[in-house]
Amino acid sequence: GKVWKALYSLAATTNQRASCGFCVAASLSSFGLLELSLGKFRNVLLNQTNPVEAVIRNIASNVTVVIFQVHAQQNDVVISFDKTPLVNGSGIGADRGLVSILRPEQTICTWYLHSLDAGQVLSTAISIPYMEKDPIPGGCNLEFDLEVDPNIYLDYTLVDIHIKFAPANLGYTRGANPPSCDSGTGQNSRWRLRYDVYQYFLPENDLSEMVLMSHIRKMAEVQSIKANGIKMLTLTADDKTNVYFSSLPGQGVIYNVIVWDPLWNTSAAYIPVHTYACSFADLVDNCSSLSKLSTKVFFTAFAVLGLFTCFFGHRFWKTDLFFMGFIVSAFFFFVFITRITGLSYDVRLIMTAVSGIIGGLLLVVSWWRFGSVLLSMFIIGLVLGFLFSSTLFFTPLGDYRVFRDDVVFWVTFTCVALLIPVLFVGCPRILNILACGVVGSYTVILAIACYVYTSLAYITLDLLRRVLNNYFNRAYTNVPFQRNDFIILSVWAMLALSGVTVQLRRERSEVPFPPHPYLIWKRERERRSTNVLDPSHHIPPLRERIHNRLLHIKELFQKNQPAGERTPLLL
């Protein structure tokens, strides 16, 4: 449609392209030849039937290695050294590359590209040169098919993302033998190399191809990666070359690794890899519609109750108790039923809602019977402490290596959560109003997350993942924080401050908490039984009133009996 017409028109003006080299080579791909320049990106349209030959000419003599790479959004692309791809000389994937080790006097490199899809696939390609002192990404590959494999292999689930790559080797001059990968572990071997893992987030709520093509350029070369990416960790040669991250379905993320040689202070970059942690091809739950209808209904209804609690929770004390009891009961029941059963998500969500309602009613009943402000405020304080502790570990603090240990994490998390009710033990009314404002307003954020992506939902979602998955402790939980998140954070802060302020002003002249309901009921019952002048004294007991009402309803369905003989005297 319009996109392809625009691409072809751009291809006609390649002589006037910008200095960044981001142009479209659609016209070249139709002839099967793609002329490349080192370090310059070119966009190319690929298809299944006509392979494109990518060529680089006039390579300088000081260049020893050229890494050629191609990227597409969702379709797999085949890249190879020969027209007929070989297993140990080709790669298949959305983000793939090959390393060309140059021979003496070699000035030309050639690769072949085609897609596995019947239609045209938009992709972008670049070739990056490296010198003899630069390390070679994937030079000590023992796991994958290529002899030298600079690719990063990515797998994802709804919970986490796993990337792995082959170790690098030291650089060397043209025509020389490559250094041995297992000759020793000293400073003259590849064991001195260090690996920096970087992460880059695409714009939120944007799944377009052109956005990916423009942003993946920022994660292809060493200096650009350092300027734009987020450095997550550094691996040594003793560490396993695989890393886990928390999954962000619907959010585009690019990963890359820079291998650094501390002796020569030189670096080289692997092939960047991207993911949205979702499928574009699925008809249901694809990247454009991730939230299920049941999730939207549940959290929308939950947000309505939370918004009411945010502004009126302390005034309507029993509603507040029901809301907090619902949260505690629903959370623990969902964890329990997910752990021990294999029920579908919709069934578990319905059962969770029922469990939450029961838990909320039980907390209300316990208040009515025992009237313990201390017990009620302990539960409410725990809910606020739970959210506060989750927010604390949502920050970069949560990615510290010490918290990889589950014992350290859960002990620290519990202590922080318990700190809130302990700090406010002397002012329970303020604690309750704070909990109503902060927790109630956060439910609105969870409801918004069902319709628009926001990282704030992962404040509690990442904690739920850690509870449900035994290996989530190995995942780095960094998330993007972009314009949408700042707007939604402002909404959360505005609602919380407004709710707390309104309730503090309205309740400052009122009693802190309502009286014990059971004692009031008991006192009233005794008063009615002893005071004969009280009209309520003559009201029959509840059991008798119910019985009389049922008899009255029964009489409505009975047929009238014949009156028999009627005389004037009887009349």
Image (cartoon, rainbow, N blue to C red):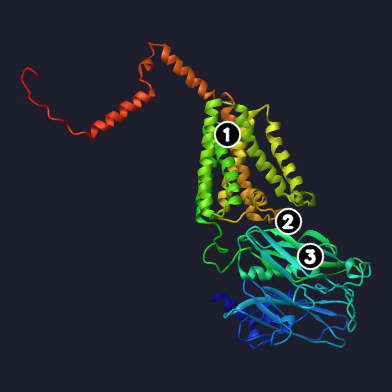
Res 96 quadrant in image? bottom right
- Label 3 or label 1, whichever comes before in sequence order: 3
Give the class, few, some or many, for how many residues have Cα within 10 Å of label 2's Cα (few <14, many ≥20). Answer: many
Q: CA distance from mark 2 to mark 1?
A: 39 Å
- Label 2 or label 1, whichever comes before in sequence order: 2
Q: Please, what is the three-letter code of the amino acid marked with disc 3? A: Thr
Question: In percent of the image, x 61 and y 45: which residue is there?
Answer: 492
Q: CA distance from mark 3 to mark 1?
A: 54 Å
Q: Which residue is mark 1?
A: 502
Q: Secondary structure at mark 1?
A: helix
Q: Secondary structure at mark 2?
A: strand
Q: Is residue 347 left or right of residue 246?
A: left
Between 409 and 479, the residue placed more toward the observer is 409
Give the class, few, some or many, for how many residues have Cα within 10 Å of label 3's Cα (few <14, many ≥20). Answer: some
Question: In percent of the image, x 61 and y 48: which residue is there?
Answer: 335
* Residue 382 against residue 180 in the figure, above or below: above
In this view, the residue farthest toward the left is 568
Q: Which residue is mark 3?
A: 241
Q: Please, what is the three-letter code of the amino acid marked with disc 1? A: Val
Res 181 quadrant in image? bottom right
Q: Position of residue 220 (x, y in %)?
A: 75, 70
Q: Position of residue 179 (x, y in %)?
A: 90, 76
* Residue 471 against residue 147 in the figure, above or below: above
* Residue 546 against residue 164 in the figure, above or below: above
- Comparing labels 3 and 1, the label whose residue is closer to the camera: 3
**Quadrant for the C terminus in the image:** top left
Res 141 quadrant in image? bottom right
* Residue 461 against residue 187 in the figure, above or below: above
Numbered tag placed on residue 286 in the rendering: none
Q: Which residue is mark 2?
A: 476
Tags 3 and 2 in contact by the CB under 8 Å rule?
Answer: no
